[in-house]
Image (cartoon, rainbow, N blue to C red):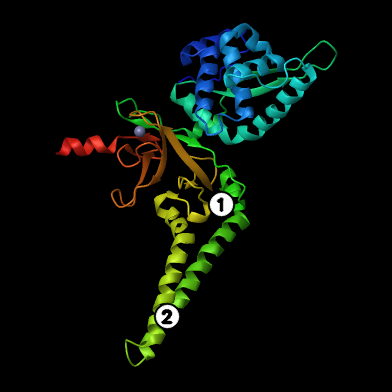
Amino acid sequence: MGTAGVHFSDRSHGEQEQNGVQTGLNASQLAELLEKLSSGWKESNRLDVQVLRAICRLSVADPEQATDGFSAMDVALEIGRLRRHGWSDCTDKDRVSDDVRRQWNKLLELWPTKEEGVRQALCDVGADVVPLLNKVEGGGAGRVTRYRIEWGAANAKSRAKEAVEPETFGVAGDVRYVCEDIQDARFFVRVLGRGYRLEGWRRGLLLGAVISSIVIFALILVLVLVQMLYSKSGADRHVWSSAATLFVFGIVFWSTTGRILRLADRKIVVAPWWMQSVDDDRLLERREPPRFGDRSIKAVRYATTCPICAGKITVKTGGLEFWGRLVGRCEHSPVEHVFSFDHVTRNGRYLRSVELRRE
Ligand SMILES: [Zn+2]
């Protein structure tokens, strides 16, 4: 993989053109890839994502125009084709400009949460670039605002994060995970989605929360033990009620903070229930040097496409069968289409075929 970045929009630069050949993908192919990626997002039917998809499709269809960008009208008409029925009022230029601008701004809000996954997917095909969403304001009369995707160099810092090359990838039946965003209105998930940096007071706060919950748990345990020691009969009602209390506290403790404690040795765990949405596919990942620039805890979701049925695979708990492990489970066949999961290499192997070979 070339170390220098590639600016496809800058065609005058010979060296960069050469690097473009090295990545094996031109701007149209990159746009095609981005369109394919974004069509697989959960939000793919949202209008802001369709703005992105429309620009990608337009860029593929007309590579010459892609460097200048496309007008709001071009984008709106393409969205109409995407949705198979018209969008916005294409007889009213101002209305179309407003509609596209509004969706573009929403897209810019969504983009930071998608960036990492897009970069990983591009990295997987050997393209050392990142898409930059660019709008050129029209300004004066007659000049319309144009929307385009530029391809910039993936910066050195983000490249350093991808120290592991997909060496083991490529065997039939294997999958390659992409790290997805976590979007949620809930405070903790929002904070962790951006990455909770373990420095200064944040580190103290997290440690404080963990330590205080351990202390509370230990105190209750001691109280129950003392009560047991001083009660005359083991069948004492108080002891049993205390033991029941302890049991309940134990469950509450484990379900709220226990999994977070495992972060220390596991590095990646299923997020506790209060951070989950309906899918139970949220993970907490501990990131630290040298793989990452700084120490942090991040809420993430890893996903890929099932090679068997093209369903969406997300990483969840291994359950009783794969005790203590995280596995990729397919939405269509969560029990049979099961893949291993390694958050460092992002590779996964079909777990069922391994068992068949053993028989
Ligand atoms: Zn499947």
Q: Which mark is residue 198?
A: 1
Tell me if I can see residue 177 in this picture.
Answer: no
From the top left corner, tell me how far across and down residue 61 is, in percent.
57, 9
Identify the secondary structure beneath mark 2.
helix
> Mark 2 vs ligand 1: CB under 8 Å?
no
Q: What amino acid is labelled 1 in the image?
A: Leu
CA–CA distance between discs 1 and 2? 37 Å
Q: Nearer the viewer, residue 278 or 184?
A: 278
Quadrant containing ligand 1 reads top left
Q: In terms of secondary structure, where does tag 1 sit? A: loop
Instruction: From the viewer's side, name the closer residue of 299 and 186.
Output: 186
Asked whether, in this view, residue 73 is left or right of residue 232, the answer is: right
Q: Amino acid at mark 2?
A: Ser
Q: Earlier in the sequence, mark 1 or mark 2?
A: 1
- In this rendering, the answer to whether 243 lies above or below 85 is below
Residue 137 visible, this angle: yes
Residue 302: x and y, percent?
45, 38
Q: Residues within 10 Å of mark 2 (few under 14, many from 20)?
A: some
Task: Determine whether 212 is above or below 149 in the image.
Answer: below
Return the residue at label 2. Answer: 242
* Quadrant for the N terminus in the image: top left
Residue at 59%, 21% (x, y): give it: 83
